[in-house]
Image (cartoon, rainbow, N blue to C red):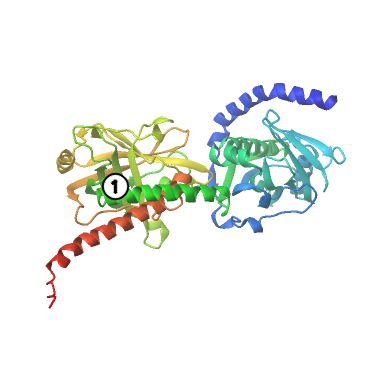
Amino acid sequence: MRGRWLWRARAVRWPAGMGIAAWRWVLRSRRTPRRRLHSEACTDVDRLPRHEGDKVQDARQGVGPVFQRRYIVRISGSPLTPAELIKRVGDDLNAATPVEIAVFDKISGAAGSLQIGDEYDVHMPGPWNCPVRVVEHAPTSFRFATLHGHLEAGEIEFRAVRAGEDDLVFTIESWARSGDRLAEVLYARVGIAKEMQLHMWAHFCRRVAELSGGRMTGEVAVETERTDVPGNGRGILARVVTTAFTRTFVLATRLRGDRPLHPEGLVFDATLNLNGTSRYWGVPFLDDTAEVQGHARLSRAVGLPVALPDILGLALRWPQADTGDGSTAELLLATTGHSVLGRRLLRPMSRWSPAFYGSLLAYRVGDRRVLLGAVGRREPAVPARLDALAHAADERALQFDLVVATEFGRWERFGELRLTGPARGDDEQPMRFNPARHPIHGMPPAGLLQQVRGPTYAAVQYTARRARRAREAGPERDRRPVKSSR
């Protein structure tokens, strides 16, 4: 009876709690610095930490990609030792937890302490309780493993160490996959569960700093690495969709010639002046201040009569100095809307500028997906004709603001793009792009359609090369002397 009333009381509290959590996320957690773990990440699911035991749900039993995340806070002026801080946290986990969205309920083990074998139900909004078990306990750390029915499959560790003479560093580190397909959609694709998790543990770190009797130095830092696991159902879906797209576009290439889309365009010299944004992304392209020389191609996608609006394309290529191997990066943009919904929809335009060019598909930056864009400035206004475009570039450089946004966030300017003439056609030596083969350093393409795009582009370009060679060889065969039949 008591359990039923507790469940009802919590169910009534969740809507108000979620409102409080959303407000705190907007004020603080949304701005939490985030970066990638890079070389310190464990990328093999079979090498992830795991403990055997009854009801344990380890990462091998999960679905979707593996996420390794760290939440780190540095504390100054605390009178506690690392061991004393860990004991205080373990004795009352709810003292640090944002109880409006999560409550630790001990269901096995003695009250008031934390020992190996103790079990907790973490009550959260949604169709899950999140049961965990203590599988490791040392003076300066303890670790939970997830049990069957948890939102995730993996382990999470809480630890404290001394830094310098007087500071403490408190860290929460997890190695996990989603527990089921619904959780994977909410966590890895939509991102709601991931942001809720970030808010929960960032708040936990801030409260630990308060419980320590010291003060935070800087902000809570979040480090994330994501690794896709081969052989799951998404790989099968990707292969099916790739086959369908490849065959469709290869057929269109054979019917329309070299390029099924963007058949005619003009090439320009491009200068990218990068200056970063107000936030730190952990990616040189978005953080560095630099001037980069490259090339750009502007084109009409469908090739409709010039009197009609068309989807306009802006393709960029530039060398990447930060990789050290002389590789190039490519970025494909097309006219879209700029709103949260519009940035996912292609938009026919009758002007090269002013216009908004978006990446349409996302790129991964740490644990976030971002979209890239270029905003054509209002002056000069250039009609969507190739001759008008060439004339405008001869008169003055075409200028665009380079912008970046998370999938549901606002656009932020991180640089300027200048295109200078004279414009050049590329009919004789086509300028071809495949951003899947030439990604921006630190920004791998994200999502199913990005997986499909690389093989599709490669197949289309291979078909086009074969068709071009066949056309060039045709006249030579016609000029060969015909042997006499006698």
Q: Which residue lies furthest to the right in this view?
A: 110
How far across and down, in percent of the image, does residue 279 sit? 47, 40
Residue at the spot 78% in from the left edge and 40% down from the top edge: 88
User: Which quadrant of the figure contains the C terminus?
Assistant: bottom left
- In this rendering, the answer to whether 325 lies above or below 162 is below
In the visual, does 465 lie left or right of 171?
Answer: left
Whether residue 380 appears in this view of the structure is no
> Residue 363's quadrant in the figure?
top left
In the visual, does 439 lie left or right of 36?
Answer: left
Check disc 1: other Cα within 10 Å, few if <14, some if 14-19, many if 20+: some
- In this rendering, the answer to whether 100 lies above or below 288 is above
Which amino acid lies under the numbered mark 1 shown in the image of this protein? Answer: Pro
Residue at the spot 81% in from the left edge and 25% down from the top edge: 4
Q: Which residue lies furthest to the bottom in this view?
A: 486
Most foreground residue, 476 or 226: 476
- The residue pinned by badge 1 equals 260
